[in-house]
Amino acid sequence: MSQIVVKDFGGSVLIPQSAVEIRDAALESAALVTRVASAAGQNMAVTALRDLKRIAATIESDREIVKAPVLKLGRDIDAKAREFLAAVNVEIERIGGMINAFQKAEQDRSDAAEALRQEEIKRQEKERQEAARKAAAEGNRQAVVAAMAPVSIAPVAPPARSAGMAISQPWKFEVVDTAAAYAKSPHLFDVIPKTFQINAAIRSGLREHPGLRIWQEVKAGVRL
């Protein structure tokens, strides 16, 4: 059963038949516009375009009005969930932080112990090889065989884990020098044009710039 319940909400979405008929009539008129090659043809096209845009503007306005309470309901649901979970999330962060700190300490302990273990293995291996060489030089085959026995040191105890735990060790990164990192590996970065700032510069008179092509387009519209 869901732990969040929406009371007194329901309904279906529909568009009235009258609006459908207006749309279809406008589409039929628009279909008659196949080319604009004269002033009369342009007048016909502007009329058809104005009717289509009026329909689009009306639907867009109505959509915003009808959707507003639905969006508000969504925000209310999110707010209610955040309010309900506020104390829960604080405890999740607090207890999870303590567990993570302990696991980090355990992993550090295990890594340090394993490093010492590997050093000890290397030391004993070096002594074993030296003893084998010395025994071989002395012609003591039994001592050579004994010296060739593999080094064995008990493995390090792994970090303590509790039942129900799931441990992951994701890799993380932090950019500490953007210029140096980009210079080394530009394929790891995106160079994104600042559209707002570029348009503002053009409005202020920018007409030429290295790496940019700046031009004007002719775009006709209609007044509703």
Image (tube, grey):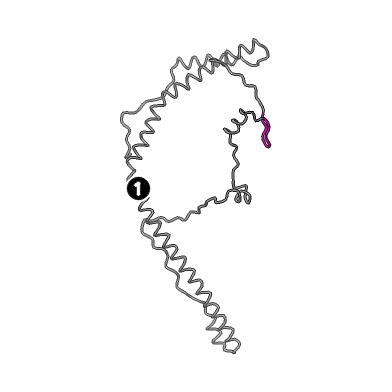
Q: Quadrant of the N terminus?
A: top left
Left or right placement of residue 214 versus residue 6 in this view: right
From this view, report whether residue 135 is shown above or below residue 224: below
Above or below: residue 69 compared with residue 21: below
Q: Position of residue 166 (x, y in %)?
A: 41, 55
Q: Is residue 198 above or below residue 175?
A: above
Q: Residue furthest top?
A: 40
Instruction: Identify the residue at image location x=36%, y=33%.
Output: 76
Identify residue type, mark 1. Val
Q: Which residue is mark 1?
A: 90
At which x and y percent is residue 181? 60, 50
Give the percent coordinates (x, y) of residue 182.
Answer: 61, 48
Q: Residue 62: x percent and y percent?
A: 44, 21
Give the magenta-colored segment's residue range: 207-214
Q: How many marks?
A: 1
Q: Main secondary structure of the magenta part?
A: loop
The answer to which of 10 and 202 lies nearer the viewer is 202
**Residue shown at 64% from the left, 12% from the top:** 41
- Residue at image coords 48%, 75%: 152
Residue 223, image quadrant: top right
Does 216 lie within the magenta span?
Answer: no
When asked about the image quadrant of residue 48, the answer is top right
In the current view of this chain or complex, which residue is farthest to the front?
Answer: 204
Provide the secondary structure element on which disc 1 rests. helix
For mark 1, does the 10 Å Cα neighbourhood hold few (<14), some (14 to 19), or many (20 or more) residues?
Answer: few
